[in-house]
Amino acid sequence: MSSISIQTAISTGRGELVNVRQRTLLMAKWRVLWVVAGFALVAMMALVRIAFLGLFEVGSTNRDMAAALMPARADIVDRNGVPLARAFPAYSLWYNPAALGGNGPPLVHSARQVAEQLVAIFPDMDVDQLTQRLADGRPGYLRRRILPEDANKIHLLGEPALEFPRETERYYPQGSMAAHVLGFVGADGHGHVGMEEVFDKRLTDPNNRGVPAVLSIDTRVQGALEDELSKGMMESNAKGAAGIILDVDTGEVLALASLPSFNPNLIDRAGEANIFNRVTNQVYELGSVVKPITVASAIDAGVVTDLSKRYQSDRPLAIGGFQIRDSHNFGASLNIPEALIHSSNIVTAQVGDELGGARLSATMRALGINERPTIELPARGFPIWPKGDWSRITTMTVSFGHGVAMTPLHLASAYAALVNGGVWHPATLQKVEPGQVVPGRRVFKASTSARMRQLLRLIVDVGTGKKANAAGFRVGGKTGSAEKPGAGGYRRTSLIATFASAFPMDHPRYVVVVMLDEPQGTVATSGQRTAAWNAAPVVGRVVPRIGPLLGVMPDDTRDVDISDLAPLIASGEGE
């Protein structure tokens, strides 16, 4: 019995052990299932979240990554993709007087010693000005855009108040080239003066920062214009100069230069000297370059129908107590071609008188001369424009370029309309893509424009514009030498010398305007101050340099036909 009881107890114990093991195994399986279910649930939630983001939300991580890779300010490039303005990381020199803390002096050494040490690193800085700046104890920039090796030298000075934070700076790889077109970015991070100001929002927009802003400027053409304009300014000892090259069919500005210029990379050191734009912001009485506009208006209105008609020219024209004179005596009478060749005020005034103030004013209004020049730049000068109905004396003086003041850009746009078939187009600094519709309005008949191409070519061929006659490029244009107004009347010793031109005149493509402010008679200009001797030669040098770059090759076998005008011309020259 006892044996049987023991065996039964053993069997019962074994059965209970088996049951415990089975329950433990089952519980383990359930735990595994719960863990797997938990992982599956988490995975499912992750997949749902990913799907939701993909379907309904922008990938902020990708956006943030793309934004981080983009420049802080978009590039500006010329029409061929050449960089004109770029953003890049750089060091700056910042003065922090509170760096040492406490009430003691902000510098370890004296302000004078620190200034001398900094000038040893940056020789263009002024010791006295820098000493005063450090002594003032005001925080601020001492210098922008310093090189890493210069930052290391500053660190070795042992002055905690001299900090060099790493910042994003604006860099102009072409230096002063096209400075008046570009403008600059100030310490406030915003654009000033030029297209930097015009495009400020677009250049900093996160949606556009990766795409450069494309200008109409061609750096090759811009460089040639600035170079020759600078030479002309130095040769004539002028105090300033302006130049513009314009596409006659689109209004695109290929080059725009105002001298003296500035380097936007150095604007924080040089201040804002020379930022004034003579091409778009300063208005001038430009003189005889207006005469072709008067003649074109008269031809268009039917006032001038016979170019052989002769006008009295051997004595001053008395009107309203004033006398209108010519620079030389060109004989008893002149016809229209001769009047333009010799630049006769007397004859042009008679044509203007016959045309009348209403019609001459209407033509100039159609050319936009009565309002600020049309271009994107913020600096645009308002013309001096006679008010009300024009009197006879006003009409006659305006006809030869006095009594109304305009910018060189006004003149360039007007000459484009003179030669392109008669259509005025607004000037633009943005590249016009092929096929893009260009706004414009008709000012002259196509036949009038054709006649003006002949007359302008004639002036360069045998008249006052001879020194602009670049061989093979069929240049046409008009000189203008106007006395500057001053207290008590016009100043005979101060001139504005201008040459307005276009080429090639058998199929005009570009207008070139050059202006010199107060040129002097020098050895280089044979002692002469007038446009025939200083502004015209600049155009004569610019055109051969830019023509081949723009697809206009010299060709002596082609020219505008002026054979019907040749019999009307006598010999001699004017201004």
Image: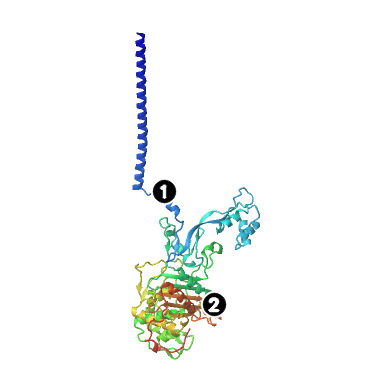
Tell me what residue is drawn at x 37 percent, y 33 percent.
Answer: 35
Closest to the observer: 129 or 549? 549
Residue 540 % position (x, y): 47, 78
Q: How many marks?
A: 2
**Above or below, 60 relative to 438:** above
Q: Amino acid at mark 2?
A: Glu
Q: Which mark is residue 235?
A: 2
Figure quadrant of residue 569: bottom left
Give the quadrant of the N terminus: top left
Tell me what residue is drawn at x 43 percent, y 50 percent.
Answer: 64
Closest to the observer: 210 or 400? 210
Q: Is residue 387 visible?
A: no
Q: Which mark is residue 143?
A: none
Residue 456 % position (x, y): 41, 81
Closest to the observer: 173 or 414? 173
- Identify the residue at the far top of this view: 1
Q: Amino acid at mark 1?
A: Thr
Secondary structure of the residue carrying numbered label 2? helix
**Above or below, 488 relative to 135:** below
Q: Badge 2 local density, few (<14 within 10 Å), some, or many (20+)?
A: some
The residues bearing labels 2 and 1 have C-alpha atoms spaced at a distance of 60 Å
Q: Which mark is residue 61?
A: 1
Q: Are marks 2 and 1 in contact (CB under 8 Å)?
A: no
Residue 176 % position (x, y): 51, 67
Q: Which of the two labelled residues, at mark 2 and mark 1, occupies the earlier sequence position?
A: 1
Secondary structure of the residue carrying numbered label 1? helix
